[in-house]
Amino acid sequence: MIKRLPIDPFLLKLFATVALASLLPAQGWGVPLFQHITQIAIALLFFLHGARLSREAIWGGLSHWRLHLLILSVTFVLFPILGSGVAAVLRPWLTDNLYLGVLFLACLPSTVQSAVALTAMARGNVPVSICSASASTLLGVFITPLLVGIMLAGATSAQATVSLEAVGKIMLQLFFPFVFGHLLRPLIGAWVMKRQQLLKVVDQGSILLVVYTAFSGAVVGGLWSSTPLSALGLIVLSNAVLLTLAQVLAWNLGRWLGFSFEDRVSLLMCGSNKSLSSGIPIANVIFPSAMVGPIILPIMLFHQWQLLVCAWLAKRLAARSGD
């Protein structure tokens, strides 16, 4: 019955994890235990993603370098500009951490799995989407912390800073396992590709662990008593505005620059999507544990919204491509 609902089942698991952390947060000796388990799970997640990434898909899409540059520009330039504008408008009604969460959301890389799947559904340029989304994930390990540091320079929270030590931790926990997994792809790639269920368990399980650990610390610190429902409603509104603006601008930029229909579909799906699987681990490294819970709320809500909207658009674009 859950599969028939117009909602991502994983999102239900996310909110169930938030509810569990709200009722039974990790405390005492459980805090470092969950932190260590989470770090290992995230490293394993990126190791398996690296082993799964096809080198042929990378080289197959590199010839479209102009389109790749445009997709990355939408992800790491246009979106942060839009995000900072929307966050500035809503700033008086948001808590400090939710405000930082909107800025953080705007700096994240594109998602890989859903962007590629939606491109295929909409009959777009799948090789380009594979190449661009994968490159976005890798570059995001470096670019996202730098963008967050720039955008949070004027933030009111003194704790919201990004140090070189944080970037080093991100590389150690995300980038190096990814590269190591990709280097071992000739040996383990076929084995990994045959075990998609294992990848799904590690993918979702690691994110759920991070969410539980993050929200446990936030709940102990008084998250729900300091977060009004009106602020959460504004986050939903900001997500809708951000996604709509990014998609309209991305589609029209592709048209103005003379890209084909298939290339514009890739630009739309890769440029306007934001990665939950990369965002939550990066937030876990950049921000203090007490801040992570509310900061990742915007990306959790945005994840569901982008899936619903992009799936609807993909069906319309697929019908249009056959005209």
Image: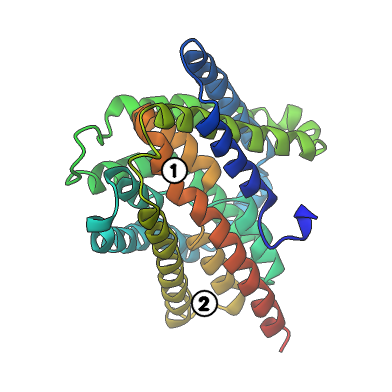
What residue is rendered at 72% in x and 60% in y? 5
Residue 322 visible in the shown view: yes
Q: Nearer the viewer, mark 2 or mark 1?
A: 1
Q: Nearer the viewer, residue 123 or 246?
A: 246
Q: Position of residue 97 (x, y in %)?
A: 31, 43
SS for callout 2: loop
Q: Residues within 10 Å of mark 1 (few under 14, many from 20)?
A: many
Q: Say which label, 2 or 1, has the lower sequence index.
A: 2
- Residue plotted at (64% across, 58% down): 116
- Mark 1 highlights which residue? 296
Q: Quadrant of residue 38?
A: top right
Residue reaching furthest to the top? 29
Mark 1 residue type: Ile
**Point 67% across, 84% down: residue:** 320
Can you see residue 274? Answer: no
Q: Which residue is mark 2?
A: 259
Query: Looking at this view, is 146 or 69 the one in front?
Result: 146
From the image, which quarter does the N terminus lie in? bottom right
- Residue 145 coordinates in the image, percent (x, y): 34, 39
Dot 1: element: helix
Check the image and name the residue furthest to the bottom.
323
What is the crowding at mark 2: few (fewer than 14 residues within 10 Å), some, or many (at least 20)?
A: some
Rendered view: 130 above or below 278: below
Q: Tell me where residue 76 sits by quadrant.
A: bottom left
Residue 133 at x, y = what percent?
55, 53
Q: The residue under label 2 is which amino acid type? A: Phe
